[in-house]
Amino acid sequence: MTEATTDKSVPQARLDSWKSIGRYIGRSPRTAQRWFSDYGLPIRRVGGDSGPIFAYTDELDSWLRKRGSVAEADSGGSARPVLLHTTTSLREETEQSEVFDFHSSPGLRRGRSGELTTLAQRMWETLSVPNFSAVTRLFRDAIDLDPGNARAFAGLSCALVAGGLLDNLNSPIGTASAEDALRRAFEIEPDSIDVYCSRAWVKMSSERDWQSARRGFDEILSRRPDHTPAVVGRALLHIAEGRLDEASDLLLETSTQNPLSAPILVIRCWNEYLAGRSTAALDMLTQGRRSGQSGPILDAVEALAIVNLEDQDRRIERLEALSADSTIHGAHRLLIQGLLGYSYGMSGESREAHRILHDFMDSGSRKLADCGYPLALALLGLDDRANAMGWLKQSYCEGSLWSFGFPTDPILAVLRNDPQYKLSFANLSYPVESPTPQLASAS
């Protein structure tokens, strides 16, 4: 095609590369090329079809307005063309957050902020460990684009709290950031379901206000039974209540609707272990890995199930293999090491058990989030109950995931009848079972 003529009396800003065009429309260069090919984005060429491309900003604005007027009717104000919304991939969406022009008009920024928030919430459905940083970044980008986006603030808070539990990312900075994001979300839109969910997570994880967390999760699930963050949170609360069958039923129902959800798979497998159904837990793990699920927390849950299932010789062999093959770093790797120490101690190999304890102390592992549970297990294998109970209390105080299961954890059964255990844990709060659990009615 040849270069078209323009009205020389009207000055027009000209963009001379796919990159500059992509930045202007708030999309990646690849998406701009696809929009040109599939939907007629007004791109011009110098010379023939293979000549250099350029575009005028006023023509791009006019094209976007025409497409956006249709989109707004269907998507609540987003300026994004409806046809394009269904053909953009998750990878492209993530790339686009990096190239968006933050100096665009307020309307475009608000629309893009809403899109990024929706994308981050979709990623919750298949959340894996590498996703945590991507999800939090998307929420932060959404907030930068629109500081009035309550969903983004609430989503960021929830992702930070869940990341602290499921990936041992607990830190004072992360906790403070989660609480501040929740406060801002509540100031903007206090009745939002996303704000309810974030507040329930903070109440459960940081404050251990079990009753408020229960009300929050039940209220959300009465409105949205498939709300993944609320399902995962409520299942954890069921576990802390000792209601393992209720947790299993809730997770099973949701997993049939969303089989790719990594958080649901992890909590389901762990719940089966806690209920003494380690064979079922390992079967679920195997099926999950065949469908592409992976990650350090799955390996950690597998190690727990192995200890509860195998005889001593076979147990040590499998744990050593899991430790050698695993790419785990941080606290989840420490759990496998702690279970190895426990198994060595229980089988009479005290020298190997003490070696693992020595490695814990020398490696600075005690500075990591939730080293308490792995250390307690290694000490328990050596029958050092007093010190084991001290590290369990630290794990609880750090708000670790594993502490939710202490009241039913099979490996801790030997401690629960110990008078010193009952005395030591008397001042730690766990939720009291409600006799007739049911969902709260929507207000």
Image (tube, grey):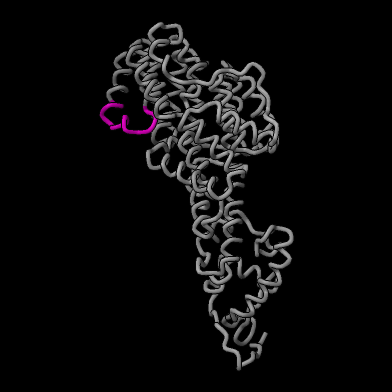
Q: Residue at x 44, y 33 (%)?
A: 325
Quadrant of the frame with the N terminus: bottom right
Q: Residue at x 61, y 45 (%)?
A: 192
* Residue 362 located left or right of residue 25: left
Q: Quadrant of residue 82?
A: bottom right
Asked if residue 67 is positioned above or below residue 317 in the image, the reply reads below
* Residue 173 percent coordinates (x, y): 38, 42
* Residue 340 located left or right of residue 259: left
Asked if residue 34 is positioned above or below residue 157 in the image, the reply reads below
* Residue 185 located left or right of residue 424: right
Q: Give the magenta-colored segment's residue range.
A: 359-371
- Count of numbered marks: 0
Asked if residue 370 is positioned above or below residue 94 in the image, the reply reads above
Q: Nearer the viewer, residue 162 or 106?
A: 106
Asked if residue 307 is positioned above or below residue 129 in the image, the reply reads above
Q: Quadrant of residue 371?
A: top left
